[in-house]
Image (tube, rainbow, N blue to C red):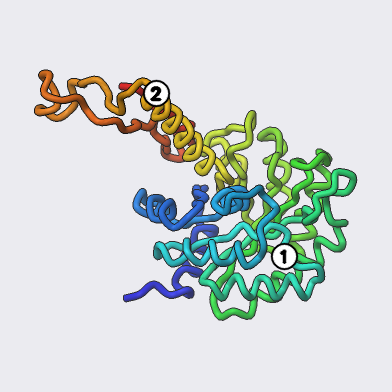
Amino acid sequence: MAVTQLDKGNSFRALHQGTRAFVIPNAWDAGSARVLAGLGFSAIATSSYATAGAYGTRDGRITRDQVLAHARAIVDATDLPVSVDFESGFGTTANDVAEAYRHAAAVGLVGATIEDLTPARRKDKPLFDIGEATERVAAAVAATRKLGFPFMLTARAEGFRHGNTDLDDAIKRLQAYEKAGADVLMAPGLPDLASVKAARAAIAKPFNFMAGIPGMSFTVAELEAAGVRRISLAGSLYRAAMGGLVAAARELKDRERSGTLTRRCRRRSSPDSCGGKRVAPFYPKWSPLRYTTPTTGLSLVSMSVIDP
C-alpha cells in the first residue's frame, strides 16, 4: 500500500511527540535522500545551504520555485516524511508567505521551517522586527492548518548566527512564534548547553538543535538531557560529501599527472589482484559517518580520502 501524505504527516508528528531525541539528517538531492532512508533514518530535512550548492550557487540566492522543485525530487525519492528549509518564507507580505507554504504542501512536504532572517540579510538589520516576524509565522501556520494532514512548522530565531547574541531576545522571539502557532522552535547558534536549556525551558513546544556549527558540538545524550527533541544537521552532510569529492578529485588529478590511476596491491584486495597479476584500480575509500545511540552521543566525522 502506498504511503500517503497523511501517513507521512502523522509519522512526522509522532516523532516529535516521543520521549527521546531523534536525528533528522539533511539531504541535498534524491540520491542522498535514498541513502539516508536506506540507513534507517525516520525522516529527512533539506538545507538551504545544500540546496543552493546543488544548484551551483550560494545560500540565499535560489528562488521559491527552485526550492520546491528540489524538495519534490527528495519527497518522491523515498517514503519518509520530508521537511523543507524554506528560508524566510519567500514572500514580501503575510499573504505571500501563506501562499508559499500552501505550495510547499502541494509538492508532498509534511514540514517546513520559517526564519526571522530577512531575505536581504542586511548587516545593519538582518532580522525582521519581532512583530513582523510573528505575523509571518502566523500566516504560515494558518496556511498549514487547513491541509487535511499534519504539517510541522518550525520557527527559527536567527539572531545568534547574525550578530544578535542576546539570549533574552532569542527566547522572547521563540515564545512569540510559539504563541503564533509554530509546532517546533529553534535558535541556531546557541553557544552552550546552558543556553540550550534556558531556551528549551522557556517554551512548551519541541525544540530543534542545529548541529554542525564549529565549536558547538554536543552528544545526543547531552542535548536530550537539555530537553532537545529534534537534532538537525544543516549542511554538514553536504559539506562532508563535497569535501570528499574535492579530496578524491585532487588525488585523481595528482595520479593523472604521475601517469597512473591505480593503487598499490593491498592484502584485502581480491585474490586475483595481487601477486603481481594486476594492481587494484583507483577508488576513494571514505572515512565513516559515525552515528551512535542517544546514550553515547552523536559524532560527525568529515569524510576524506584515505590511502589504505
What residue is disc 1 on?
90
User: Of the numbered discs in the image, which one, if any, rests on residue 46?
Assistant: none
Name which residue lies at 78% across and 66% down.
136
Residue at 43% of width from left, 51% of height from top? 32
Q: Is residue 134 above or below residue 239?
A: below
Up/down of 244 relative to 228, above or below: above
* Label 1 Cα neighbours within 10 Å, binned few <14 / some 14-19 / many ≥20: many
Judge the density around disc 2: few (<14), some (14-19), many (≥20) Cα neighbours within 10 Å. few
Looking at this view, is 19 or 231 the one in front?
A: 231
- From the viewer's perspective, tell me whether residue 167 is left or right of residue 74: right
Mark 2 or 1, nearer chain start: 1
**The N terminus is located in which quarter?**
bottom left
Where in the figure is residue 158, as x and y percent of width and height? 75, 48
Specify whether 127 is left or right of 308.
right
* Residue type of the residue flagged with mark 2: Arg
Q: Is residue 276 visible?
A: yes
Q: Disc 2 versus disc 1: distance between alpha carbons?
A: 47 Å
Name the residue tied to disc 2: 257
**Residue pictured at 59% horizontal, 32% vertical:** 217
Left or right, 28 with respect to 276, comes to right
Q: For the C terminus, give its image quadrant.
A: top left
Q: Amino acid at mark 1?
A: Phe
Percent of width and height locating residue 122: 85, 48
Name the spot of residue 133 as percent of width and height, x first. Answer: 81, 61
Q: Nearer the viewer, mark 2 or mark 1?
A: 2
